[in-house]
Image (cartoon, grey):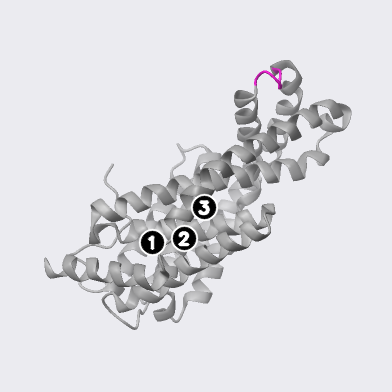
Amino acid sequence: MPMSYHLKLKDKSVQKGVRRLAKSQLVKALKEIDDGSIPSGKTIHQVRKRCKKLRGLIRLVRPCFKKYSKENKAFRDAARDLSAARDAEVMVETLDRLEAAYADQLQHDAVLPLRDELIELLSDTTEDDVIEDRLADFRFIMSEALDRSHDWKVKEDGFEALAGGLTKTYRRAQKALAAAEDDPSPAAWHEWRKRVKYHWYHARLLREIWPDMVNTRRDLADRLSDLLGDHHDLSVFERRMGEWDTIKKDPRLGDLLLGAIKARQDELLEEALPLGRRLFAEDADALQERWQLYWTEWRSAA
């Protein structure tokens, strides 16, 4: 499937490119909601990804986009309203990954009652009438955003429209890494992951300026984001364990899960930290200057 989430040479201006990309994501979100053949869980997952892509897009032009705060809040809140069902699904997936990775410690028969409980909780959050109402609300928000996007204004053009957002996001990722290393809490690692994710979106959006170089960076940022995402899912799983009846009845299972969570998180950070340190080693101003040169050469071919 061809990738369409990027600026193109045929975009006559950054503003036109941003409007095109916003329309693409919003139209796809509306189609996914209207497609009755897609299971509700998958629909929620897909349309929440659309919101994240939209937020990544407007963050790239943030200093030149006056409506950034309003639009960012709209997309953030819309995705958040659908988060309960996705969060419940992630808990099941996290347990399955733990069981697969630590099968010797986590025997299937011991884990099965907890999985059944989590499946039941997932069913409660994905009841048809509840999901239908939330998706209807979400659809209305996306439809309104589509109407607004036709008139979005980006006050600069060329790389000047992108430099501020690109550099600010990159610098925030550097600071979040340093903060997490100073205070390695779940919240700090999650904050770093969010910043890495936005840099990943920016690499995707600008991949055409030099595909061989930028796509490598995009793939590394994607891998880093996945590692930190798994780390976060495990932290949420650990935090919620006290709510589950199966754990209350079987504290030994809880202890085994805690041990597996700690071991897996250590493994994830063992890979993530060296990767992240290299990915964000370059000075932010130097990265901006380098990518601006790529942009200039790319546009000169138009």
Per the image, label 3 sits on a secondary structure element best described as: helix
Query: Looking at the rendering, in which quadrant would you find the N terminus?
Result: top left
Q: Residue at x 76, y 23 (%)?
A: 113
Which callout, 1 or 3, points to the residue nearer the camera? 1
> Residue at label 1?
202
Query: Looking at the rendering, in which quadrant would you find the C terminus?
Result: bottom left
Disc 3 residue crowd, few under 14, some 14–19, many 20+, Cα 10 Å: many
Magenta residue span: 103-107
Task: Return the mark for residue 48.
Answer: 3
Near-viewer residue (258 or 44): 258
What amino acid is at disc 3?
Arg
Instruction: Tell me the distance, in whole angstroms, between the alpha carbons under discs 1 and 3.
Output: 18 Å
Q: Are marks 2 and 1 in contact (CB under 8 Å)?
A: yes
What amino acid is at disc 1?
His
Residue 300 visible in the shown view = yes
Residue 278 horizontal/vertical position (percent): 44, 54
Instruction: Tell me the distance, in whole angstroms, between the alpha carbons under discs 2 and 3.
Output: 15 Å
Say whether disc 1 or disc 3 marks the residue closer to the N-terminus.
Answer: 3
